[in-house]
């Protein structure tokens, strides 16, 4: 088998985006990071690229993804896009600190973009230095694996490379680079660029490319562009439904951070909430709370509306509006579906939505660490002892007792035996989440040159529903200082 593995020198590149005319991007190489060294790599992502994880050479990874070497077959480009940032259109965006190194086609015929984030300046850097700091790179690297572990659509990352270069952010900080791996680096903002700059022929070219590459099943539809938009709305509803089901807050939901493939994209000041707080704002720079937890479904719909506007040269306006109207009910259905699974319900009953809402109200009122609560609920068997174990999650135990009585009733409608139900519930109720304090601890150690925790967290977050006895301390209540962590756009 090992003969069929590629090496970093023999990756099977086929760079379709680089074959577009040059106004889609500009060609530019990475600026080498001084003292580049490997901090971590992800064996599962290596396999996606046909690389043998056992044969990977750490210094070769640092050589290529520290920007010193150019991978044979790579043609690095900075993509042009625009987008709405905090509600305002910005025509000057593009890859300002990341480069698409190329597309690798693996033996299954899957096409993976390699994007080096933190690769140095490009034409689109504006006033930026083109770099990503170690702090933000660790956060992106770890959370993409955590999201994957939870089954939430996300970009992946092959490796994290540290360096000796320092830049000014929260004081002087070390730079790093992450190799992001995903089929799709096309953002809503790519379409907005061609729409607003009135390059409507190119808009069609881009749409055709996306259909061929991401949505081939719509190619024969009456209007493939409308059918693609319907798919994008549906998948976006699913993505944000899962965010809401696990308390994930993206933090910077600008249209340039929305993927056409509807994966969670461009991680910055994100959080998994330690307590259920619908008004939670993850990004200190978001003064109005535009991207607060409870706003996310509406904002995703707003972003879809911006995409719909950009598709006006290709699709009838009424058809776009009809599609957008289906977003909210789809979101609710997907979200409730996931909560039903988290509660151990396989069958569907008319009162389920009410029972879910009542639980969310309880979470809100008592600021419950709801991910820990739901994990504990996996062991609940209706006994008094088990009930006593859950009551400390809230301050009003009567309200939770009432809810649990209804829940007991509801469970009698399920066919699965208690052990089977528990097993199913554990698979969707993680014991481990990448809470901000855990990322902070990994960052603190990494700043001291110690990368053990980064690598341990990567391993645990890959299988967040499993037991990891050596990491038990991260399954409990977050420390008090967790509430004081401040995240900003530079996170
Ligand atoms: P983000 O907030 O990461 O989504 O980035 C928004 C825009 O700013 C994108 O066009 C980025 O490429 C650009 N950008 C962010 N940070 C930097 C940086 N350090 N240097 C240059 N451009 C940047
Ligand atoms: Mg971005």
Image (cartoon, helix red, strand yellow):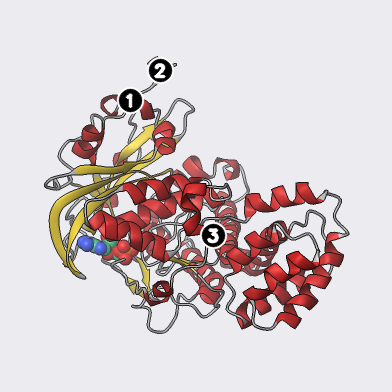
Disc ID at residue 55: 1
Label 1 to label 2: alpha-carbon separation:
10 Å
Q: Residue at x 44, y 37 (%)?
A: 44
Label 3 to label 2: alpha-carbon separation:
48 Å
Report if residue 386 is visible in the image: yes
Disc ID at residue 349: none
Q: Secondary structure at mark 3?
A: loop
Check the image and name the residue furthest to the front: 385
Q: Along the polypeptide, which appears first: circle 3 or circle 2?
A: 2
Q: Residue at x 23, y 57 (%)?
A: 447
Q: Secondary structure at mark 1?
A: helix
Report if residue 262 is visible in the image: no
Q: Residues within 10 Å of mark 2 (few under 14, many from 20)?
A: few
Residue denoted by label 3: 315
Q: Residues within 10 Å of mark 3 (few under 14, many from 20)?
A: some
Q: Residue at x 26, y 66 (%)?
A: 92
Residue denoted by label 2: 2
Horizontal arrangement in the rendering, residue 295 relative to residue 420 (left or right)? left
Which callout, 3 or 2, points to the residue nearer the camera? 2
Residue 197 percent across, percent down from the top left: 32, 64
Residue 240 percent across, percent down from the top left: 55, 63
Image quadrant containing the C terminus: bottom left
Residue situated in front as seen by the camera: 424 or 208 = 424
Callouts 1 and 2 close, C-beta under 8 Å? yes
Residue situated in front as seen by the camera: 89 or 121 = 121
Residue 90 percent across, percent down from the top left: 31, 71
Horizontal arrangement in the rendering, residue 395 relative to residue 76 (left or right)? right
């Amino acid at each position: 088998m090992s003969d069929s593995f590629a090496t970093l020198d023999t990756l099977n590149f086929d760079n379709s985006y680089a074959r577009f005319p040059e106004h889609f991007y500009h060609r530019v190489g990475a600026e080498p990071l001084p003292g580049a060294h490997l901090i971590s790599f992800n064996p599962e992502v290596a396999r996606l690229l046909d690389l043998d994880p056992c044969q990977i050479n750490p210094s070769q990874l640092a050589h290529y993804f520290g920007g010193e070497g150019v991978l044979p077959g790579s043609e690095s480009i900075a993509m042009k896009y625009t987008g709405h940032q905090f509600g305002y259109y910005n025509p000057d965006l593009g890859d300002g600190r990341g480069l698409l190194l190329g597309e690798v086609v693996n033996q299954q015929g899957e096409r993976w973009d390699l994007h080096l984030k933190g690769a140095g300046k490009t034409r689109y850097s504006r006033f930026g230095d083109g770099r990503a700091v170690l702090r933000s790179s660790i956060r992106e690297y770890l959370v993409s694996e955590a999201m994957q572990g939870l089954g939430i659509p996300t970009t992946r990352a092959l490796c994290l490379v540290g360096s000796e270069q320092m830049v000014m952010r929260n004081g002087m900080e070390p730079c790093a680079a992450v190799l992001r791996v995903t089929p799709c680096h096309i953002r809503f903002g790519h379409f907005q660029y061609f729409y607003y700059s009135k390059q409507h022929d190119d808009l069609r070219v881009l749409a055709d490319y996306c259909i061929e590459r991401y949505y081939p099943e719509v190619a024969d539809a009456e209007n493939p562009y409308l059918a693609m938009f319907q798919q994008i709305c549906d998948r976006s509803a699913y993505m944000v439904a899962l965010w809401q089901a696990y308390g994930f807050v993206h933090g910077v939901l600008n249209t340039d951070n929305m993927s056409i493939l509807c994966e969670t994209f461009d991680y910055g000041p994100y959080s998994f909430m330690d307590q259920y707080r619908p008004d939670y704002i993850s990004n200190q720079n978001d003064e109005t709370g535009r991207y607060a937890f409870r706003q996310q479904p509406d904002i995703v719909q707003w972003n879809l509306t911006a995409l719909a506007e950009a598709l006006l040269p290709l699709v009838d306006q009424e058809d776009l509006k009809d599609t957008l109207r289906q977003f909210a009910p789809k979101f609710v259905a997907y979200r409730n579906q996931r909560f039903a699974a988290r509660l151990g319900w396989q069958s569907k009953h008319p009162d389920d939505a009410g029972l879910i809402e009542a639980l969310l109200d309880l979470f809100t009122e008592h600021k419950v660490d709801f991910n820990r609560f739901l994990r504990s609920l996996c062991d609940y068997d209706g006994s008094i002892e088990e009930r006593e174990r859950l009551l400390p999650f809230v301050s009003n135990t009567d309200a939770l007792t009432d809810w649990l009585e209804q829940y007991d009733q509801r469970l009698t409608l399920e066919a699965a035996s208690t052990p089977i139900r528990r097993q199913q519930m554990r698979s969707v109720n993680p014991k481990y989440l990448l809470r901000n304090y855990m990322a902070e601890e990994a960052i603190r150690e990494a700043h001291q040159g110690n990368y053990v925790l980064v690598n341990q967290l990567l391993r645990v977050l890959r299988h967040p529903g499993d037991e990891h006895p050596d990491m038990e301390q991260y399954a409990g209540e977050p420390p008090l200082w967790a509430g004081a962590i401040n995240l900003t756009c530079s996170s």
